[in-house]
């Protein structure tokens, strides 16, 4: 019977070791998921456009760092996402991209900065749209989809033109006429 107790103790130790390993693995997975949830969510900051349109800068942070990257574009305000908006101009932002009119680098920390030219304000409004590139943001990965309306600077208040004030005409001073003749 002594042999049976050894086997039971050995089996108990193996079971305890397997249970401890399972708990450690579960804790590691939960911890990693917590870290992923704590990662910075994607966001964009859009500079204010001049009252008649012009260049704006879009700065993004928290984007997924991969070879696919994101598209950044301008479209009419109110569209559901990048792929539903009528996009006027687009920049593809991804790791390894050189900065150009149509491409921009995505930094290792998930940040980018691009410049686009917006038209004069319209009644529909203009928004910046960001989405996972190559159609991925339409269905597969919508975590990178964002939009933000473009704000335009207010027209400066016209400075009033001062009204001319009328100043009275100077009246001539009476002048003495020199006397002629002998002094009196």
Image (tube, rainbow, N blue to C red):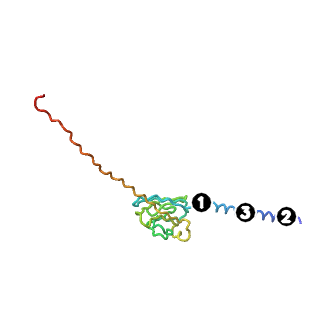
* Crowd around label 1: few <14 · some 14–19 · many ≥20 (10 Å): few
Report how many numbered discs are placed on residues in the image: 3
What residue sits 57% from the left and 59% below the top? 40
Query: What numbered label is drawn on residue 113?
Result: none
Estimate the spatial distance between the alpha carbons at disc 3 and disc 1, rounded to whole Å.
24 Å
- Image quadrant occupied by the N terminus: bottom right
Residue identifier under label 1: 39
Residue identifier under label 3: 23
Left or right: residue 4 versus residue 152 is: right
Estimate the spatial distance between the alpha carbons at disc 1 and disc 2, rounded to whole Å.
49 Å
Closer to us: mark 3 or mark 1? 1
The percent position of residue 62, horizontal first and vertical second, equals 55, 60
Residue identifier under label 2: 6
Closer to us: mark 2 or mark 3? 3
Magenta part of the protein: which range? Answer: 19-24
The percent position of residue 131, horizontal first and vertical second, equals 51, 66
* Crowd around label 3: few <14 · some 14–19 · many ≥20 (10 Å): few
Estimate the spatial distance between the alpha carbons at disc 2 and disc 3, rounded to whole Å.
25 Å
- Image quadrant occupied by the C terminus: top left
The percent position of residue 78, horizontal first and vertical second, equals 48, 68
125 or 166, which lies in front? 166
């Amino acid at each position: 019977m002594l042999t049976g107790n050894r086997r039971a103790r050995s089996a108990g130790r193996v079971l305890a070791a397997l249970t401890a390993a399972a708990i450690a693995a579960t804790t590691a997975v939960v911890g990693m998921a917590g870290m992923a949830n704590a990662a910075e969510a994607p966001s964009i900051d859009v500079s204010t456009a001049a009252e008649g349109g012009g260049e704006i800068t879009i700065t993004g942070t928290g984007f997924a760092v991969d070879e696919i990257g994101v598209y950044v574009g301008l479209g009419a305000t109110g569209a559901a996402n990048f792929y539903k908006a009528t996009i006027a101009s687009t920049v593809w932002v991804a790791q390894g991209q050189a900065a150009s009119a149509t491409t921009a680098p995505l930094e290792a920390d998930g940040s980018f900065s691009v410049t686009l030219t917006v038209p004069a304000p319209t009644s529909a409004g203009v928004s910046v749209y960001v989405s996972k590139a190559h159609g991925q943001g339409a269905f597969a990965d919508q975590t990178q989809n964002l939009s933000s309306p473009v704000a335009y600077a207010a027209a400066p208040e016209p400075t009033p033109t001062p009204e001319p004030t009328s100043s009275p005409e100077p009246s001539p001073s009476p002048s003495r006429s020199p006397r002629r003749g002998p002094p009196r």
